[in-house]
Image: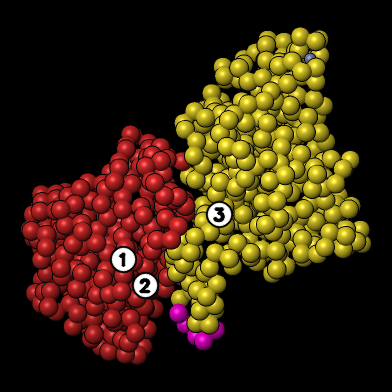
Chain colours: A yellow, B red
Amino acid sequence: MAHHPRWLETLALRCRCGNDIQLSSDGYICGCGRKAGAWDGAKAVIGSPIPYWGEIPQDQMRRLLDESERNGWRAAVQANLEPVLSEYVTTPDRAAFQEILPLSSGALVLDVGAGMGGIAAELARNYRVVAQEGVAERADFIALRAAQDGLSENLAVINGDVNSVEFAPGQFDAAIVSGVLEWVGLFDTSKGVKEVQVDFLRRLRGFLKPGGLIYVGIENRIGWAQLRGVPDHSGIPYTSLLPRFLATWVCRRNRNYRSSQNVTYRTYTYTHGGFLKIFAQAGLRARSTHISVRGYDYPTELVPLVEEAIVTYTLEHLNRPGGLKTRLLNRARLAAAKPWFWRTFGADFVFVLEAAGA
Amino acid sequence: MHKLVAAALARSPDRISLATLGGRKGVAITLGYLDSAKWPAWVAKVAHTSEAVLKLAKEHQALLALAPWAEELGVPRVLDWQCDSTNACLLTSAVAGRLVRIIFRLAGEPGSGSEHLNAALSWLERFRRTIPAGGGGPAREAAIAALAPLKEECGAVAGLRSLLESAAEFAAAPSHGDFWYGNLRFDGKRAGVFDWSGLAARSPLHDIFKLLTSCCFEYGGAVKTPPDVAAFGSIWFSATPLARYFREKIRPVSDDQAELRTAFYHFLAESILIAGPSTRGIWYKITSILERRGFPAPGSLLPAGIWT
Ligand SMILES: [Zn+2]
């Protein structure tokens, strides 16, 4: 039972029988006799493990884990990962959105699909964080980095699939859904994509305390990056712009890895209005909406859809006045510094959601 | 979100939208906008590292010292402050106005940028007249103390070190310390100034050197590209129309050759100290070229070839 934060014992899972289950020295065991999960010394393991997937192949991931244990995770990451990925895993910038999240210190936060733990570890400096991650190796990595950085008292790792970890209702102050909502349609193919996404959000809403928040970072379906041809979640450019049936048709005809996973285009993103609609269907509403100019993965520069803020940001990021082309481009960017334009074509959205009745 | 930001949101009767500019040297900056207002209502700086906390504490002290003249000079007012060893938050009013990039082309006549340059220079003049000597900032002893880390940083350049010995003699008045156009806002022609962590007693020429130099370097987007060695040489050591124009801007403030020279190298030493790791080498290069020429006063003519 060693190595878990005390407070984890007060966090309850919900058994299929309807009872709450708390962590004991034998793991998560319900009064009905069902064993929902175990504590393996570093992390809680809930349900059956999901097959490995991730930014790097499994054997490289295992090497990374070994080396992290021997030399410290930062050194291991720098030695084993490409610079871009290394930056992604180590930078505190991925949690920069916390500056706009109205949480008090010590709040209990659920990081959904925590990946390599970049966000969870950073949040654990200020809050108590439950990092939920489906892949065992990545969950181990999060636990390791937290321990080595002295954050274990504030960070608990739960290794279990998004859809199978069922918390008892009303426990979290916030849930972080950064780069996750667009993928959930792939993990449940039993119903329509939008339905899966709405059910996912509704379930998360249930985990929240009254007044709790859901943070969502996600691409705009018709954002300027998509219009410029940056690859969509299918691995193919422009698929988000197509009607869904056409996107499916394109994915079926393409042999790239991601599109083969995406057999019937199931990684939906939406326009601003489209997002508000699915939030409403899940009983949520946007408390604030921002454009994350560096992409939702690096939410250091969050611009609210307020004219003065957009103009200020644009002025500070104009190109140095030079030839005719830059002058025209600068003029166009200033002309486009309007809330309607950013709301329509901004690359990535960052939403803070609350229950619609709140 | 820092609790001072949460408190500011709770205090406001109107809806406030937050914008963030983060990740610079351990400081996250959050601006609060009222929906229909011009300019932000307030600015919060949150420091996460002990180094950033120290810098923010200095800025807080500076703003308290300047508070009596804040309205008149367009300087932020302190609204709230909290600090411990690894975390600090400074909440201030925002400076009214917008960013104007004052940029001059090295070749050719100074043209379009000069209107706002003049507004910035007259702000400096107003600042000098408004703040009594010895008021609004550290006294001469503090100025001498502030030179110590400079002398240490520039220890590699022996001549520069001895030049700095006399810098305190000319440290007659409070000065901003990082007075470039990015730290100014203009509401029409009225300028306001923020980012006061460098407030110290210096020669009044110091801020002018910084301002004029910054108007000739490349600043692409929010990212500063390294200062250009040749551009630096052209502004301060050539006879181009722009160099002459700049000299005319400096003359009314001081024509004393000793002060010009000392203040100029004081400015150069501070540029080395506050430069990031990527640009520090370039400031060193500029300094060592000038060292070989015996640290000439700005305005002396040097052959253009030495800068490349
Ligand atoms: Zn049960």
Chain letter of mark 2 equals: B
| Image location (x, y in percent) of residue A355 | 62, 38
Q: CA distance from mark 3 to mark 1?
A: 26 Å
Sooner in the amino-acid sequence: mark 2 or mark 1: 2
Q: Is mark 2 within 8 Å of ligand 1?
A: no
Residue at image x 49%, y 45%? A100
**Magenta residue span:** A321-326
Q: Residue furthest front?
A: A357
| Image location (x, y in percent) of residue A310 | 49, 64
Q: Is residue B262 left or right of residue A50?
A: left
Q: Secondary structure at mark 1?
A: strand
Q: Is residue A175 left or right of residue A160?
A: left
In the rendered view, tell whether residue A228 sits above or below residue A156. Answer: below
Q: Secondary structure at mark 3?
A: strand
- List the residue tagged with mark 2: B100
For label 1, count other residues whose C-alpha is less than 10 Å away and answer few (under 14), some (14-19) or many (20+).
Answer: many
Which three-letter amino acid code belongs to the residue tagged 1? Leu
Does residue A43 appear in this view? yes
Q: Nearer the viewer, residue A79 or B181?
A: B181
Q: Is residue B223 left or right of residue A4?
A: left
- List the residue tagged with mark 1: B184
Q: CA distance from mark 3 to mark 2?
A: 25 Å
- List the residue tagged with mark 3: A290
Which three-letter amino acid code belongs to the residue tagged 2? Val
Label pair 2/1, CB-CB below 8 angstroms: yes
Residue at image x 75%, y 43%? A198
Label pair 3/2, CB-CB below 8 angstroms: no
Q: CA distance from mark 2 to mark 1?
A: 8 Å
For label 2, count other residues whose C-alpha is less than 10 Å away and answer few (under 14), some (14-19) or many (20+).
Answer: some
